[in-house]
Image: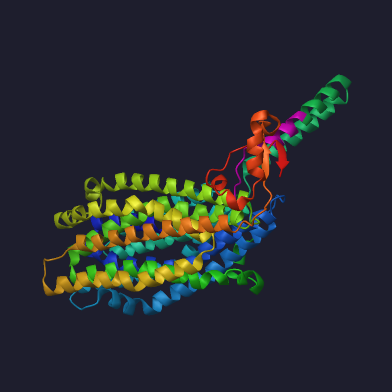
Amino acid sequence: CSPLLSLIDTSAVGLLSGTEHQAALNPAVAITDYAALLIAFMYTGTTNLVASSQEADRNLDDKPKAANYLITSIKLATFVGSGLGAILLLFGKPLLTAIIGNDSISPIVFSTALKYVRIRALGMPAAAAIGTFQAACIGLQDIKSPLYVLLAAALVNLIGDTVFVGLKHAWIGGAAGAAWATVLSQYVALALALKWLTTKSANSKSHDSSQTIFGGKLKAAASRFKLFNALSSTLEKSRKTKSTKKKSDNTPFSTRGFLQNRLKKRDILSMPSRESTADFLPYILPVTTTQVGRVSGYVAMAHVVSSSLGTASMAAQQIILSVFYCLCPIADSLNLTAQGLIPPIYAKDKSMERAASLKKTSKEFVKAGAIFGLLKMVLVSFIPLLCRFFTTDVNVISQVTTCVPFLMLSFVVHGIICAAEGILLGHSDLAFLGKMYGVYFFALPYFMLRVKKAALSNPGSVGLSSVWKIFTGYQFVRVALWLGRTAMLSRKATQQIKPGTKIEVLDDINILNEGIGASFTEILKTEVSTHEELIADPILVLPKNSTTF
């Protein structure tokens, strides 16, 4: 929920406190939000572990393995978030100095940014725990629960900004007030998430109670009339059958009350066991390397803008990034969803069905990514009209407008990038991602720093749009490499099928018993290695009659 909270902060500070306070948010948010990305291994690990446990919990209503991973992740996130918060409190000033890069920046901007970083550090434990809650919900295919928590946090943050930002006190008003509003909203969101996980719906309880009361009265009356007794018995059986069928077929899984009697609020302050924590260790190095590679580009952008382009450019960059990060989750949801859906398929035994399912699922995710990218491109085109909700500074608005075309191009491919990266993570292709982001860690800052050199040697020759040109190029390089790697993994899944592998066909139209099915039967009897086209275009059938070759 951090991007939405930062967007609200940017708008409130720009309108109520002016350009200098809004400019201070650029390096400050860069430190707090990018530092938070370094604990993303918690979120990736939680989503993958919870999703993978679905197979083991398939026939168990209480999903014990998934519940154990969720409890462990929340406990672990609290301590990881506390450690990150402590680092920001202790090293906030040198980190801020490193990003700004020189002493030419306004002292008001620097001191305001430092206050923002230190206040936001206090909210890191809650932010980490909320992130794991959202990741677990994705792994359990429950998309509604995180949305409720996000909306509640956004409302609290908006109210907090309205109350605090307009104040004149240095530690409560302005950008500092926005930081307090964000921290408050994060802890409220955490409290709501824990309440949601540990408390079942009151409606379901009252519904069950009313059924019990109704059943008791019906049985009492039926004891006098045998005919009514038989009728009530029939109706009760019918109701139970319909209720069971509706629950199993139509009711989506909800995490509400999922940890009731298994987690108490005070338990999040206790360390998880070493055995359960060990499952998260394989995600630390590759995911953190990936995040460092990704973050390096954004940190370089913040450094270049803060050290060489001036206060107005810093404010404009903060507006652009706030909108950028707020729109990113639209496609990031594909990343998380792929991490939830791909692992159970990938974990199956190597077979033609597995290869076909992986290929088809990957194609659908890429298609969805393209659609999401176009949607975001359209939304970005409205930024010039929305600038008045973020600032009244004409210079800032002008700089934002010049960057919109490059932002639109970046978002065209962003959906596909997120979908493809989720597919790669679902395949546990962490080594490839780690290596690529290791290259980006050096390559992207190199090109960004060239903009800084040009700005300092020849002021006016480059501007904020120059930074976004480089970022757009980075996006197009990523989409090409990610799609190429995804295609390679799809081919690899096909090649892993050994010759002579038996194929199970679910024949719903009895084609094998008809004359026209003879040639179809012969094809299926042929070894898999000579008929990869079957995997390229798998036949969609419904499970009714099963025939094995």
Magenta stretch, main secondary structure, is helix
Residue 63 vertical placement versus 455 (above, below): above
Q: Position of residue 461 (x, y in %)?
A: 12, 66
Q: Nearer the viewer, residue 384 or 123?
A: 384
Q: Position of residue 375 (x, y in %)?
A: 35, 44
Asked if residue 457 can be seen in this view, the reply is yes
Q: What's the coloring here?
A: rainbow
What residue is shown at x 51% (from left), y 64% (from top)? 429
Q: Is residue 69 magenta?
A: no
Q: Position of residue 67 (x, y in %)?
A: 65, 58
Corner quadrant of residue 468 = bottom left
The N terminus - image quarter: bottom left
Left or right: where 345 falls relative to 389: right
Q: Nearer the viewer, residue 492 or 325?
A: 492
The C terminus - image quarter: top right
Q: Nearer the viewer, residue 509 or 194?
A: 509
Q: How many marks?
A: 0
Asked if residue 106 can be seen in this view, the reply is no
Magenta residues, start to end? 238-255
Residue 162 vertical placement versus 84 (above, below): above
Left or right: where 239 falls relative to 199: right
Residue 517 vertical placement versus 173 (above, below): above
What residue is shown at x 41% (from left), y 51% (from top)? 331
Q: Is residue 248 magenta?
A: yes
What residue is shown at x 66% (from left), y 34% (from top)? 518
Corner quadrant of residue 297 = bottom left
